[in-house]
Amino acid sequence: MPKMKLGARSILVMAWVCSWACSFAMASVTYDHKAIIINGQRRILLSGSIHYPRSTPEMWPDLIQKAKYGGLDVIQTYVFWNGHEPSPGQYYFEGRYDLVKFIKLVQQAGLYVHLRIGPFVCAEWNFGGFPVWLKYVPGIEFRTDNGPFMAKMQGFTQMIVNKMKAENLFQPQGGPIIMSQIENEYGPVEWEIGNPGKVYTAWAAKMAVGLNTGVPWIMCKQDDAPDPIINTCNAFYCENFVPNQYYKPKMFTELWSGWYTPFGGAVAYRPVEDVAFAVTTFIQNGGSFVNYYMYHGGTNFGTTAGRFVTTSYDYDAPIDEYGLAREPKYTHLKYLHSAIKKCEPALISVDPTVTTLGSNQEAHVFSSSSGVCAAFLANYDTKWPVSVTYQGTQYDLPPWSISILPDCKTEVFNTAKVIVPSFHARMTPVTSFSWQSYVEATPNADDANTFSSIGLYEQLNVTWDTTDYLWYMTDVIIDANEGFLKSGNNPVLTVMSAGHALHVFINGQEAGNGVYGSLNNPQLTYSQGVKLWAGVNKISLLSVAVGLPNVGTHFETWNEGVLGPVKLSGLNQGTRDLTWQKWTYKIGMNGEKLNLGTLSGSNSVEWAAGASLSKKQPLTWYKTTFNAPAGNDPLALDMNTMGKGQVWVNGQSIGRHWPANKASGNCGQCSYTGWFTETKCLTNCGQASQRWYHIPRSWVYPTGNYLVVFEEWGGDPTGISLITRTV
């Protein structure tokens, strides 16, 4: 009997091993002309971008479930090199950067993952996802045929792939990752730099394929992607996109659901009728993979935003920055996804037959020999609705719309017929604050942690992006015989800066702030009369970065900070050039070094309150405490009475605030019909580009929360309030 039991157990174990091995062997991802093929089955895949560090681990399960309920099959995310390798060889995969946890949550929800390793990501993310230390690798040039860069890129890519393999996360291992991406939108750069770009493209493709992930690799906006890499499309519309080989599927890796907001820019929105139209035109033309960029945009916490990009990365996505469904966009697209899935048997079987139904109307019909049939009836007219007849039945098509007939008979969805009510989120004040203030003094050349040199230094070379702030200080000696001392015609100080913002102090007194560049023109010039006295005058320039560039050819060579010339005109001698005299530098603000953003650091200075509270004064720190409102509604800060600076809650950086930078643009009426661009549909003109700043619920306690604001320009903190967001 014992031997018989042992034998039976062995047979069971062998059967289980065989079953596991067989299922492992059967797990595969390939592709053909029609679609991505998962485990031998062609699939029409609907995907959405959710970037794990732009939300919190506590938000991830709900975001993923909303994506699944909204009809998605795939979650797409970049991998953020500068978050995972903040210093060479030192890796970080915790908190918001716990990539493995995020992917496993997607798997638990029964969805797939498209992992865009890059490692260049653009994404309106600081330095395009590259760590700043990469810029200082000897001999490096980014994204070209350059040995030092390719060695570092390969090292990071291989590390990520090995980490995914170790966790069994690729689909042939039983995991959810069905595709990976190498590089990102490199085609335009390759075109600009020529042969070194072509060599780099071929190398990157070969390197990626050689990592043997068992899943396809893609390159987006890369028409010459070498086999077996799939080239894909990113745009507002991609219906006319054709892969570079017939045997590759037609894929839309970034359908832009809205647009990002730069400080100083209006907030873009994309009508859901047009988003649905873009999806459907792609599908009816043989597309088999569509990804919404973004499905949830989230928040650029801390200093993760790219140059001049707002802290909010809402993107007018179907799930808003706070994790709430944006209606009618979310549900209308859910209905679209359901209609497309009903067409899937026909879509994966044959290519469409296109027939004309009118001057601006077409039918795209997928009819297979097995009897399955799906039809898409399109009206491209931007002004007029039409009635068309298809197979003896009349169908009413609004302008710029497509009707979907999964059985070639019954209309189940039209892209422009929105039956979902609109819900505008309410921002309800729930708490005001009792503030204390601390005004930071301008530094002196003999302060601790300063250093001096002849001439002007580029800012990033000094700070390495450890802070937004760099002080430039110098002395100007004015002779008692200067004519302006008697005439009162103050000399003019002119400062030319590579960006991004500048504060000027003369002898410790503010002599001009609010001088700043923009996304399209980060450089700035300060030119203003300044009050000087006979003898030694202290000139202090506070240069402020607003994120690092995230896109552009060789953006690692771009500069920031006061590079000059710096000149003083209106003197007896005419103009004095200060550029090449002795300058003293100080990195960051004292409050940063003292960790005033944390409760423990707050005791290191004396704070004022009540009648002594500082208002509308530059370089002021404010602190307060608050209790969280009951419930689970998302939280935000209304910062509309403030100027520019940064915010911390319980030591966590919410991000940069800049409500004083008002939005410019044309915010007139917007129709969903016709081709969409990022400037077509705008809101918030004349108002703050960003007024409300998201506080994740998981960052607050029921009571005793510590809130700190650093205000550069000068604002009124008594106007700040805690907000709940509801729909």
Image (spheres, rainbow, N blue to C red):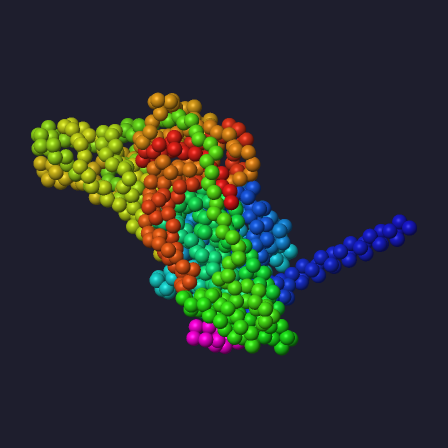
Residue extending furthest right?
1
Q: Residue at 33% x, 43% y: name it.
A: 661
- Of 590 and 270, nearer the camera is 270
Where 230 falls versus 141 (above or below)? below
Where 699 falls versus 609 (above or below)? below
Q: Residue at 46% x, 36% y: name it.
A: 429
- Of 647 and 201, nearer the camera is 647
- Of 492 and 552, nearer the camera is 492
* Horizontal side, residue 571 vs residue 74: left or right: left
Q: Residue at 52% x, 70% y: name it.
A: 395
Q: Residue at 48% x, 76% y: name it.
A: 357
* Horizontal side, residue 350 vs residue 546: left or right: right
Residue 149 visible in the current orientation: no
* Residue 482 place in picture, x, y as percent: 10, 32
* Residue 4 place in picture, x, y as percent: 88, 53
- Determine the image quadrant of residue 468: top left
Residue 297 visible in the current orientation: yes
* Residue 86 place in picture, x, y as percent: 46, 43
The magenta segment is 351-362
Main secondary structure type of the part rendered in magenta = strand
Where 284 falls versus 325 (above or below)? below
Where 367 falls versus 626 (above or below)? below
Question: Is residue 357 one of those drawn in magenta?
Answer: yes
Question: Is residue 1 one of those drawn in magenta?
Answer: no
* Residue 436 place in picture, x, y as percent: 39, 25
